[in-house]
Image (cartoon, rainbow, N blue to C red):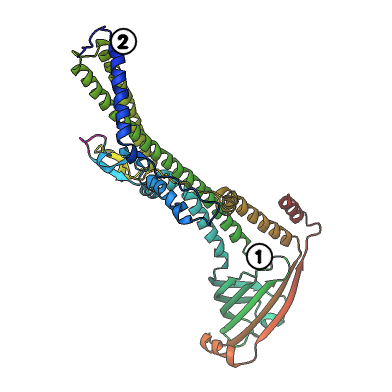
Amino acid sequence: MRVKLSGMTKVSPVWLVIALVVVLADAARAQNNGAVELAAPPIPIPSLDGPIDFSQFQSREELAAPIQDAADSSSLTQPWWTENENSRLNPQIAAQGWTLEQLIWLAVENSPLVQSVLVEPQILQAQAAATNGQFDPSTFVESIFQDSSNPVGNTLTTGTAGRLNDHIWNNSSGLRAKNTLGGLAELSQDFNFKDSNSNFFTPDNQADTKMLMRYTQPLMRGAGKTYNRSSYVVAALAADESMQEAAKKIQEHAFSITSTYWELAAARANYKQIERGLRSLQELHDQLVGRSDIDTLRSQQLRAESAIFRQRAAQAKAWAQVQAAEANLRASVAAPLLRNGSGEELIPLTLPADWKSMVSREDELTTALNYHPEIQAIRTNLQASRVRLQVAENELRPTLNLVMEGYVRGLNGDFDAAKSFGDQFTTGSPSYSAAFSYLRPVNNTAAKAILRERRL
């Protein structure tokens, strides 16, 4: 007997009882027919009288295998909204997929923020390299012409002439260099030409040549590589500290790109889920409309339409979130390839990791102490302060220099400079001298104040 349910028609209790009896009878019949097939295998119970046969029990690996297979085939590891064929949200426009690593490298190469934070370290590195210029050898050339006419008060100066007239042309060229120990070396060659009206000036038209070697070495203040290379070391440490600050800013920018990337992935997944829910609601609404003359009410159709409208509003909001995430990602990366002139859709190709990462507090602390930019910057600053303190301690010492000098010399008339130059090495013997130079301020106020400042 068939009962039609429509409008406010009520079902008779008699028919409900009859239907319940039929269902229970069918269930009992199915249980009797399939009892043997559905019965679980008996659990082996070991006997206490004899040895236990472990072969009848499943091993731990066999018991864990189905669980592992289920985990490997779990649909949660590969959500339906991440499939490539369903990745495009708007099939009317072009789309391009990007991995997270590709976007980060594009940002490093093209982002104005990254380029700007790298300018200061490069400037400081150039300044550090400039401090090594003090150790570059320097060439020099000097030429002085002098024409003098001086009165004389002694006849032994000129003989008969009442004034001493000299014509002198001094020329000097050579090389000066400072080493990292603080020593200053000089090698020069002089070509001097002189003529005078003195009766005692002989030979006439003199060509005087002289090769000079001089070396000055600090023994106390200003001595040692630590002191003389301190300016370079401090400048290099400042550049390294600036590089650590730049690395920190770049890492923060990369983290911002990563966050925006996952925001885009989450917004796209949310949009797809809302879109799928909208299709399901539409199908449900169509079913309700199709059964309107059988068992559905007008109020049910209206509720379904209301749910569809709410879902469409949520879809529009989700699409706006996708567009905002794409705009933020393009602005963060700032690469020409991501300019949205053609309206391309950005598709994240890197999927969220669904595996657990074991983190050790000790290992992470060690890594942070060795590589964290802020800690490295502090360490670099401490090293620079230590170098400045060593410089201040060195400048507190008195100045004691060792000065050594040696030369060879030649002299000929008729302005014969070539012969005089040859006589330097063939006539006579080299001349040399050595001396010490000592200097100490009485109170040494400046050095003491600087040392006190750097110790603080």
**Quarter of the image where one finds residue 344:** top left
First of labels 2, 1 by sequence position: 2
Residue 303 location (% of width, % of height): 29, 15
Q: Residue at x 38, y 35 (%)?
A: 266
For mark 2, give the secondary structure. helix
Residue 325 location (% of width, % of height): 36, 34
Q: Quadrant of the N terminus?
A: top left
Residue kind at label 1, given as amino acid type: Thr
Marks 2/1: CA–CA distance = 104 Å
- On the rendered structure, is 387 left or right of 87? right
Is residue 274 visible in this depiction of the protein?
A: no
Residue kind at label 2, given as amino acid type: Pro
Nearest to the observer: residue 125 or residue 54: 54
Q: Residue at x 54, y 64 (%)?
A: 133
Residue 146 lies within the magenta run: no
Q: Which residue does the numbered mark 1 point to in the structure image? A: 226
Q: Which residue does the numbered mark 2 point to in the structure image? A: 13
Which segment did they paint magenta?
89-93
- Neighbourhood count class around disc 1 (C-alpha, 10 Å): few under 14, some 14–19, many 20 upward: some
Count of marks placed on residues: 2
- On the rendered structure, is 258 left or right of 172? left
- Neighbourhood count class around disc 2 (C-alpha, 10 Å): few under 14, some 14–19, many 20 upward: few
Which circle, 2 or 1, is nearer the viewer? Answer: 2
